[in-house]
Every structure is written in C-alpha cells, then in structure tokens.
Amino acid sequence: MNAVAVLTALAEPSKRAVLNELATSGPASASRLAERMPLTRQALVKHLTALESAGLVGRSRRGREHVFAARPEALVGTARWLESLAESWQGQLGALKRAAEGAAPPS
C-alpha cells in the first residue's frame, strides 16, 4: 500500500470522479467512460493511468479493448493507515490536554 500515491491521486477532483464512476457503474473501457463523463478520451486515459499507478484501478483486456475497474484494496489500506494515524494523534492530544488541565494557571 502506497498511501502517498493513493492520496495524491485522490487529491485531484477529476481523478476522484473517474474512480467514483467506475465504482458505481462498474468496469468500463476508456471510450465508454468518455461518453459518460465531461472529459476528453485523452484526459481520461491520463487519469486512468495515474489511478492505475496508485493501485486504485485495475486494467484487463477484452479483445482489443482495455477495460478498467475500481480496486478498493488500495483505499482500504490507506483508510487503515489514516485511522491508525488519527488514533495516535488522539492519544497525543489527550495527553497534552491532561497535562494542560493539570498545570497550575499562570500567576
């Protein structure tokens, strides 16, 4: 799991839209996606390549067409990492709060 690659890919709204389209509508070729989205086929292929590099999209071949599908595994791994990071910060912030509440007020 490469959280940096996943988060970088998800930072761009068009890439999120492409991933969402694949996740909700199912596998599709770049041509089919271009028909359903306000993107050129060239821009769409660029976004699909970036999403594939991040592990968010998989590609298979059906005859002459490349078919793309959402792969949730990379999102699950990144979500777990973010959850552990949040838990760590919550612990540190809790300790800071307890220390601040236990400290004597300035005179």
Image (cartoon, rainbow, N blue to C red):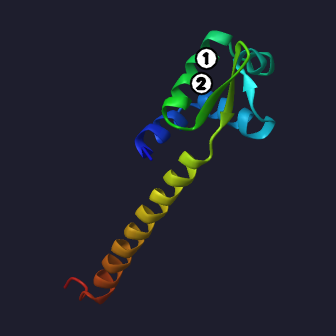
CB of mark 2 within 8 Å of CB of mark 1? yes
Q: Which residue is mark 2?
A: 48
Image quadrant assignment for residue 10:
top right
Identity, as a three-letter code, of the amino acid under mark 2: Leu
Query: Which quadrant, please, contains the C terminus?
Result: bottom left
Q: Is residue 48 above or below residue 25?
A: above
Considering depth in this image, is 66 or 4 the residue closer to the camera? 66
Badge 1 element: helix
Q: Is residue 73 above or below residue 85?
A: above
In space, the residues marked 2 and 1 are separated at their CA atoms by: 5 Å
The residue at 74%/14% (across/down) is: 31
Badge number at residue 45: 1
Query: Among all residues in the image, which is located at the extreme left?
Result: 107
Image quadrant assignment for residue 67:
top right
Identity, as a three-letter code, of the amino acid under mark 1: Val
Q: Is residue 10 above or below residue 91?
A: above
Q: What percent of the width, then of the height, locates residue 82?
A: 47, 57
Q: Is residue 42 above or below residue 92?
A: above
Badge 2 element: helix
